[in-house]
Amino acid sequence: MTTPPVEPAVVDWGTQPGDVPRSPQYGDIDHPPSGALAQARHVRLQGNGLPGRWAGRAQFTVLETGFGLGHDFLATWQAWRDDPARCERLFYVAVERHPLQAADLQRAHAGSPLPALAGQLLQAWPPLTANLHSLAFEGGRVQLLLALGDVAAVLPGLRLQADAFYVDAHLDAHRDGHRDDYSPARNPAIGQPRVIKALAALAAPGATLVTSSAATPLRAALTSAGFVPRPARSRNDQREITLADWAPRFRPRRPPSAAAAGREAVVVGAGLAGAAAASALAQLGWSVTVLERHAEPAAETSGNPAGLFHGSLNADDSVYARLFRSAALVAHAEHAAAIATGAVPGQATGLLRLAQDAGGLPAMLALLHRLGLPPGYVQALSAEEASALAGVPLAPTAWLYPGGGWVAPAAWVRHALSTPGVHFVGGVEVAALAREGDAWQLRSASGHLLAQAATVVLANAGAAARLLAPLGHPPWPLRCTRGQVTHWAGQHALRLPVAGDGYAIPLAGPGCGAGLLCGATREAGTPEQDGRATPWAAPETRLADHRHNLQRLQRLTGLVPPADPALWQGRAGWRLHSNDRLPIAGALPLAAMPAGQRLDQARLLPRERGLFVLTALGARGLTLAPLLARLVAAQATGTPWPLEQDLADAVDPGRWRVRAARRDRAAPAGGLQPAG
């Protein structure tokens, strides 16, 4: 099913100096920025008891039902900055149906009383794609999760517990004929009982809510959903508003949580997955120990000289395309920041993926229009346009992913492991995992205790399943492929990475030299077939595989490699895939389910307390690891998930159990299976 495309806001800026922005679609107007910020402080913050309620807390979450120009967010961020007793981390989640284009956002904040904060928001403003956008500020201590889409459709997919709600009901007009703030996306249906119930499902114990509406139907909907509304008046203009406290007379049903007590974790594995998981947890203030069987990190496939990251698209905007779109946006932010430090070689200025689409460029442009994907995410280029960017002649049309690029995986792993709070321990192999009281214990083959913690993340590729088997966890349907890359030093004309049938990466930077890397082969097999003492270690390269890579390079780009095989260098490794081509990420379901437990929805499965997995990233680890590590970290810490529930279900470790339960439920009575 195609995701409805994002419809950016249409703004009428007026014709006279001092005119305030207006939405022609909804008739909303805005205060000048100073007035909007004052309104946010007097209504949104004070109505929710802020900043006092977040004092001394590890984390605090605000959910807003319309982002608009961002004044409420900026006011909340500034209040957090100014408060010496502030919470350690502020999470701000905003749903916006019609977000502003970057140019409109810049114009809206041209005279902002908070220019530094507004400037940071503008710099981080994402391409307007229909998914969750994670924007980090203050070194990650302030995080904005921007959900673009209709509020009624978006809310059920969010996983979080909000401590404070900023709700714009859009149910009634004020006496002067307009609402008191501008947000064209604020849904007229926000006051509907089903939307209020969706908000209630996300309420944390003790949550509060404020809305600028005084409508009786809204207050009735709040009461029915478990809120206790109380009329109030805005301090700055004495308009009637509604405050509400979350105090349900019933016990809300919540999806199972796997979060354990404490703020310490052990991660097993120091490749891309393990390093990303450790860094994501440490950025949330946790202390993380990483155990790696090799003496150094990134000793297996994550040690390749370079690798690609980019998004994906398809005609039906499938789960696969949506997952990789979300992942690519996070990957670009993380990899670009790492490259900017100078410690990680790479390039985050775009990637070309050659297209063989039937219908050529017109069909590609029509697909982009139908999907509503913005040029900041992907563009359709003619062969001439693509060749001009690449610096070499390219025959077919191409997709340009402006946020794509390449990075040196081993350097990125070391960069992630240098996150404050991460401690790397190499040369230790975990052979057994067992529960002991409230902690998980990790032991060597001789039984020596290597580490223990209430939270453990298994990011050690195929070895994760072997650690789980003795605990009764069923195996996942996994497969391995052997892949080899080829590179050489020297001059070439390629300026951007190009992918298609194979790929080509223009190398530059310390640790990877100058030259070009191409690949990669794909051969089914298992590491055990390699015949080495440590089968998962990098296998030997093959001359035939180098020739195969170089032939594809010439077809892809026309570049001619050195004729002397002595100049060909390379590296081989094993990739781990699942049978559905999706990664495995998240909390482990219980090995033995309670009697009567529903098994047909992943979100309902009870979880092993404090046990998580991140594996089977296949050949797309650089794209997937940053986002999925944040998902695991969010599940472990009880913070807002950076991924919608249905996408989290798609990568859930228990999804095969869910599919089996659905097959059993669909089977005819008497146990007979349908033909075929």
Image (spheres, rainbow, N blue to C red):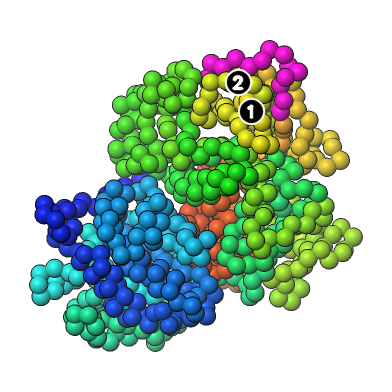
Label drawn at residue 491: 2
Mark 1 surroundings: few (<14), some (14-19) or many (≥20) residues within 10 A = some
Q: Which residue is mark 1?
A: 514
The residues tagged by marks 1 and 2 sit, at their Cα atoms, a distance apart of 8 Å
Residue at image position (17%, 69%) is: 179
Is residue 476 visible in the rendered image? The answer is no
Using the image, determine if residue 620 lies above or below residue 177. Answer: above
Please give left or right for residue 287 compared with residue 308 in the image.
right
Residue at image position (73%, 16%) is: 565
* Frontmost residue, 524 versus 70: 70
Mark 2 surroundings: few (<14), some (14-19) or many (≥20) residues within 10 A = few
Where is residue 400 shown, x and y percent of the image?
42, 33
Magenta part of the protein: which range?
A: 553-570
Residue at image position (71%, 36%) is: 573
Residue placed furthest toward the right: 446
* Frontmost residue, 635 versus 157: 635
Q: Amino acid at mark 1?
A: Ala
Tell me whether circle 1 and circle 2 mark residues in contact (CB < 8 Å): yes
Label drawn at residue 266: none
Where is residue 495 shown, x and y percent of the image?
51, 27
Is residue 446 visible in the rendered image? The answer is yes
Residue at image position (51%, 65%) is: 141
Task: State the image quarter where residue 619 is shown.
Answer: top right
Using the image, determine if residue 327 lies above or below residue 531. Answer: below
Please give left or right for residue 441 compared with residue 350 in the image.
right
In magenta segment, residue 30: no
Where is residue 458 shown, x and y percent of the image?
69, 57
Task: State the image quarter where residue 162 is shown.
Answer: bottom left
* Nearer-N-terminus badge (1/2): 2
